[in-house]
Amino acid sequence: VKGSDLVILCAPVEIIPSLVKTISPALKEDCIVTDVGSTKETLCNECMEVIPEKVTFVGSHPMAGSEKSGLENATSNLFENRSCFITPIAEKTPAIEMVIRFWEALGMSCICVSPEEHDAIAAHISHLPHLLASVLCAYLSDKNHLWKSFAGTGLMDTTRIASGSPDIWDSIIRQNIAEIELSLEGFQKELKKLDSLIKNRDYEAIRSFLVKGKEFRDSL
Amino acid sequence: VKGSDLVILCAPVEIIPSLVKTISPALKEDCIVTDVGSTKETLCNECMEVIPEKVTFVGSHPMAGSEKSGLENATSNLFENRSCFITPIAEKTPAIEMVIRFWEALGMSCICVSPEEHDAIAAHISHLPHLLASVLCAYLSDKNHLWKSFAGTGLMDTTRIASGSPDIWDSIIRQNIAEIELSLEGFQKELKKLDSLIKNRDYEAIRSFLVKGKEFRDSL
């Protein structure tokens, strides 16, 4: 593996397996292929089916990015101090080590989980927050448009990711729909709890909710 | 009014009316008092009751701030290019003009609305986003705590405001509970719509949701 080629595929998640297939004839023996897709189970399974025998595929998902796309929005420190999922399917191999070293060299800390586990975690900490931002924006867009003039830093930050590309998010949602459904159900239950507290004017319990939320956020 | 004193009260919303009462004996004739509280109807009514006859009270709510508090977190450009609610109770008076000029001098654009209107708007564009961030954090804090290591920029931004002071937010919620209840009901209906689309695997309609959200966010 030392000195092996490392190929990093960056494309919408539904394209990556076909990209692997397309480049396969050109891949050298012992070459390592990884990707940066936001979903992993379907993607890794499909990639494993088409990857040549002497080539190793190891999935990655660097948790960094912005709502912007295009070369003109590139930043040199995008990956610094951020975390990266590594989702190997086989046992720990030198190929996995190499992928980890690559992301670490860009300033990331890597954590290995299975593709299935990745999808459950990503649904909760990335896909759910994205959908909540989208729903909040969709909800507010039906209100008086003059309200927009009052948008403060809080609204700007909580909704920033709703500006992300609908094409990219359409692909992510399609590939992780089951986990997203679960995370959304859980969130709605939690929201319903707060809703009841508000309806009951149970200010003590509402305050405990705020404290619990703050403790979590402060620990990130 | 030209040359009048302008007093700006910065304190938790439930304290402000009692502050007005406390400082009343020291206020000069023609003095103007404003505040920076995040709620307006209850607050302005209570302030109007205790304000001396020759002094004018005009409510303000500058839409700027952060989840941090304390002098050590002060920034000199906090108000630049942000908007500010002005919520006068009486007709347009020179006092209102003076309050507007003050915030404009700090780089803000001011919009006059009634205290009631303010509270409805603020519930939707500020208090609701805050509660959603708190609920998301409270929800995630019951999950595997290792998931936290994967927090990306999306989660960090959407939840930043959940770090706000529970004391300050407790006061805000108490003073605007009716409007918050309405905004939360509306949001839950919208979320339920998306939930149904997800359950039905209606990807076309989910995509329209994302597009609608993006259009709103891009217009902020």
Image (cartoon, coloured by chain):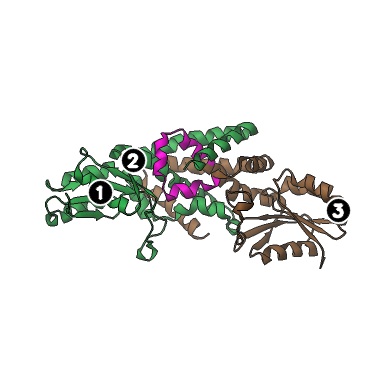
Chain colours: A green, B brown
At x 59% / y 63%, what residue is drawn?
A: B81
Secondary structure at badge 1 equals: helix
Q: In the displayed image of the protein, which residue is found farthest to the bottom? A: B2
In the image, what residue type sits under mark 3? Ala
Is A77 one of the magenta-colored residues?
no
**Is residue A41 toward the left or the right of residue A48 in the image?**
right
Please state the chain letter of the residue tagged with numbered disc 3 in the rendered image.
B
Please state the chain letter of the residue tagged with numbered disc 2 in the rendered image.
A
At x 15% / y 48%, what residue is drawn?
A: A55
Point out the tag, 2 or 1, that comes first from the N-terminus. Answer: 1
The residue labelled by disc 1 is A99
From mark 1 to mark 3, how far is it between C-alphas?
69 Å
In the image, what residue type sits under mark 1? Val
Numbered range of the magenta stretch: B134-161
Query: Which of these two is toward me, B79 or A70?
Result: B79
Residue A58 position in % (x across, y down) = 23, 46
The residue labelled by disc 2 is A119
Secondary structure at badge 3 equals: helix
